[in-house]
Image: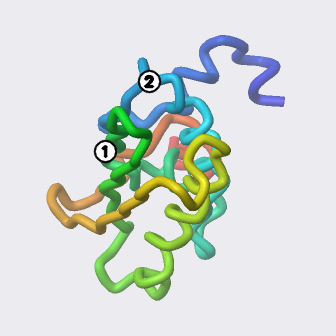
C-alpha cells in the first residue's frame, strides 16, 4: 500500500542513509534483496533498512565482505545475526558455497536510530 502511494520515492526511502554499498556492482541488487530478507527477531524491520549493514564489499572474484552492527551490544541474538546475513548472501546464485563470505560485527560508529531508512522509521511509528 505504501509502495503504491509513493512509487519511485519508495526505493529511495528504503535506503539507509549511511550504508556504504557497491550500488554499481552487478551482484549488488541480488545481495541487497537477500539481506533484506534477514530480520532481527525482536524488531519487525529487516537489517538493511534498520541501518545495521554498514558496508558491503564485493571483490573481482565475487567474494563478499560485510560489516554490520547491532542495535545494542547486549542484543540476545548477537551471535546469530552474522551467520544469518552470511546465509542470506550465500543464497545469491553467483555466490553460493563457492565464494568467501565474511560478516564482521563492528561497534564503531555505534548504531543509532538516525541510521535507519525512512521506511523503517515509518514501520516503527518513529515520525
| Residue at the image position 53 percent from the left and 31 percent from the top | 27
Q: Nearer the viewer, residue 3 or 25?
A: 25
Image position of 9 (left or right of 117): right
| Residue at the image position 58 percent from the left and 65 percent from the top | 87
Per the rendering, the mark at residue 126 is: none
Kindly report which numbered mark, 1 or 2, lies closer to the viewer in this rendering.
2
Q: Which residue corresponds to mark 1?
A: 55
Rounded to the nearest angstrom, the CA distance separating label 1 from label 2 is 14 Å
The answer to whether one can see residue 70 in this image is yes
- Give the answer, above or below, for where 34 lies relative to 105: above
Per the rendering, the mark at residue 25 is: 2
Q: How is the image coloured?
A: rainbow
The quadrant the N terminus occupies is top right
Q: Nearer the viewer, residue 12 or 36?
A: 36
Instruction: Indicate the secondary structure of the residue bearing disc 1.
Output: strand
- x, y percent for residue 83: 50, 73
Q: Residues within 10 Å of mark 1 (few under 14, many from 20)?
A: some
Amino acid at each position: 500500500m505504501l509502495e503504491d502511494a509513493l512509487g519511485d520515492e519508495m526505493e529511495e526511502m528504503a535506503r539507509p542513509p549511511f550504508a556504504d554499498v557497491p550500488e554499481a556492482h552487478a551482484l549488488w541488487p541480488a545481495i541487497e534483496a537477500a539481506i533484506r530478507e534477514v530480520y532481527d527477531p525482536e524488531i519487525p524491520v529487516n537489517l538493511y533498512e534498520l541501518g545495521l549493514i554498514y558496508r558491503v564489499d564485493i571483490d573481482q572474484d565475487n567474494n563478499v565482505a560485510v560489516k554490520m552492527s547491532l542495535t545494542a551490544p547486549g542484543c540476545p541474538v548477537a551471535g546469530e545475526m552474522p551467520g544469518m546475513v552470511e546465509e542470506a548472501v550465500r543464497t545469491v546464485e553467483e555466490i553460493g558455497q563457492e565464494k568467501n563470505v565474511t560478516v564482521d560485527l563492528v561497534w564503531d560508529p555505534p548504531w543509532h536510530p538516525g541510521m535507519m531508512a525512512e521506511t523503517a522509521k515509518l514501520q516503527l511509528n518513529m515520525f
